[in-house]
Image (tube, rainbow, N blue to C red):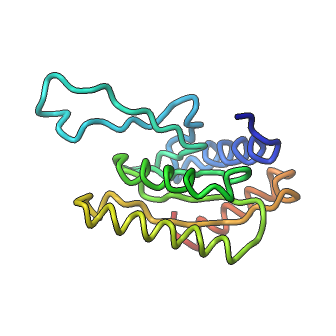
Amino acid sequence: MTESLYHSRVIKHLTAYGNETRRKYISAHCGSNLPVLISHPQANRRRTLPRPIQYEPDVYFIKRGKGKIVFEVLDSQLSKTSEIISDIIQCSISPDIDYLIFIMPAISKQRQNEIIDIYDIITDTLVNLGINQDWVPKPAVYPITRKESLSFKKVKTILATLSKQDGW
């Protein structure tokens, strides 16, 4: 599947913002270049284990201290519930992910609420099945319009404001 111009622009801006904000983040990575590894839970105890699963988020920041912030840019995937569910599950079983942030190209409170509802259903089910509540990342859904995505300066301002507002 090919990325849209919006998708690739926002990924580029997110990566640049993360790498520019060194006092908060060690680095920013595209998941396709450096995936997050999901290892077997008993990896330290067993010698023969399956190879780790590679989770490729659009972008993730490695925070100072410990933890990651994952960004998933929803463009063509905005209406695909199965892809949103997949992102939520992969994030919830990956180690050290503090936030799962969805970026969408339109300002739609209804769709933002639907994504949070999907998140709540999936994460509550995972916790009920035994996933540690501490592993479940905090969710956020933010709009960055197609027009705003044309300017790194505008995206940087939006991200700085949201980061301060929501504490990531």
Residue 52 falls in image quadrant: top left
> Residue 40's x, y, as percent?
25, 36
* Above or below: residue 154 compared with residue 14: below
Q: In the image, 25: left or right of 131? A: right
Furthest toward the top, the residue is 48
Q: In the image, 141: left or right of 145? A: left
Q: Please give the name of the residue rendered at 20% of the width and 33% of the height, measured from the top-left corner.
A: 43
Q: Please give the name of the residue rendered at 58% of the width and 51% of the height, measured from the top-left corner.
A: 71
Foreground of the two, 23 or 15: 15
> Residue 16's x, y, as percent?
69, 43
**How many numbered badges does the structure rendering display?**
0
Quadrant in the picture for the N terminus: top right
Residue 36 falls in image quadrant: top left
Q: In the image, 36: left or right of 162? A: left
Q: Please give the name of the residue rendered at 43% of the width and 51% of the height, measured from the top-left corner.
A: 91
> Residue 50's x, y, as percent?
27, 26
* Above or below: residue 55 compared with residue 159: above
Furthest toward the left, the residue is 45
Q: Please give the name of the residue rendered at 42% of the width and 63% of the height, measured from the top-left corner.
A: 122
* Above or below: residue 33 compared with residue 168: above
> Residue 89's x, y, as percent?
42, 53
Foreground of the two, 57 or 16: 57
